[in-house]
């Protein structure tokens, strides 16, 4: 989120969530991806959308994290069109997979529809539906200020562990030395979850220990 637009984003995330609920529906935030030439946007966008989801008790579709993970695994697979902003067919299919998993709770793995993509490409893109449940748990952890500190800390650790394991092997790949988006999203987001949860804790229930 551009620094000059952060307040507007937060304001209208709340306003539009309220409008959606007034009409009997539930809001869902679609976490967009970093520009192809600006992978550092991944962490910033993910943090903003997860916070918006927590503040407005809404689901978040982690398309941006799925893009970063796919690029880390298969950097040769182009998820963008020429402008480096909008998705290619492969990027659109990946985004659709995250919607299916996040909104409907269905796994896209093994789907018969592949949008004309090669079978190995579709199978690769279908794998990242797991990020949907991990992001949903992150939103719950961040907004659950009424729970005790230890319980939230454990939930944060549970979110961080699977992502860290998945990214561990990627750090050793010499092709990815210049690609920091996926790893930054993992480390940066979990740190933000902890800080924000602790900062928003009811004053009377705080202890003097630091959040883990």
Image: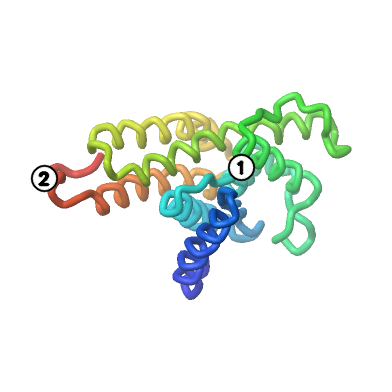
In the rendered view, does 137 fall on the left or right side of 178? left
Mark 1 / mark 2, whichever is N-terminal = 1
| Quarter placement of the C terminus | top left
Tag 1's secondary structure? helix
Which residue lies at the image location 75% right of the left edge and 47% below the top edge? 92
Which residue lies at the image location 43% right of the left edge and 53% below the top edge? 51
Which residue lies at the image location 77% right of the left edge and 33% below the top edge? 122
Q: CA distance from mark 1 to mark 2?
A: 37 Å
Q: Tell which tag, 1 or 2, sits nearer the viewer.
A: 2
- Seen from the viewer's position, the closer of residues 171 and 98 is 98
Q: Position of residue 196 (x, y in %)?
A: 32, 52
Q: Which residue is labeled 1 in the image?
A: 66
Q: Position of residue 87 (x, y in %)?
A: 74, 53
Tag 2's secondary structure? loop
Residue 208 tag number: 2
Which residue lies at the image location 34% right of the left edge and 42% below the top edge? 144
Q: Do the numbered discs 1 and 2 sit on residues whose CB atoms are within 8 Å?
A: no
Q: Is residue 164 visible?
A: yes
**Displayed quadrant of residue 85:** bottom right
All told, the count of numbered labels is 2
Count neighbours of disc 1 (C-alpha within 10 A) and say few if under 14, some if 14 to 19, many if 20 or more.
many
Count neighbours of disc 2 (C-alpha within 10 A) and say few if under 14, some if 14 to 19, many if 20 or more.
few
């Amino acid at each position: 989120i551009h620094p000059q637009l952060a307040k507007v984003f937060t304001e209208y995330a709340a306003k539009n969530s309220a409008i959606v609920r007034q009409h009997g529906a539930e809001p869902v935030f679609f976490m967009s991806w970093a520009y192809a030439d600006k992978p550092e946007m991944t962490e910033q966008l993910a943090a903003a959308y997860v916070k918006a989801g927590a503040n407005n008790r809404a689901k978040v579709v982690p398309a941006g994290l799925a893009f970063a993970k796919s690029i880390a695994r298969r950097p040769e697979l182009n998820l963008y069109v020429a402008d480096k902003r909008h998705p290619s067919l492969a990027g659109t299919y990946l985004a659709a997979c995250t919607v299916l998993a996040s909104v409907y709770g269905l796994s896209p793995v093994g789907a018969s529809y592949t949008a004309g993509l090669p079978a190995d490409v579709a199978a690769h893109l279908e794998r990242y539906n797991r990020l949907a449940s991990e992001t949903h748990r992150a939103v719950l952890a961040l907004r659950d200020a009424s729970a005790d500190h230890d319980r939230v800390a454990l939930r944060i650790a549970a979110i961080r562990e699977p992502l860290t394991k998945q990214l561990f092997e990627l750090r050793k790949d010499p092709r990815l030395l210049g690609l920091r988006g996926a790893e930054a999203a993992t480390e940066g987001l979990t740190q933000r979850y902890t800080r924000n949860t602790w900062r928003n804790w009811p004053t009377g229930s705080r202890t003097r220990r630091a959040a883990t």
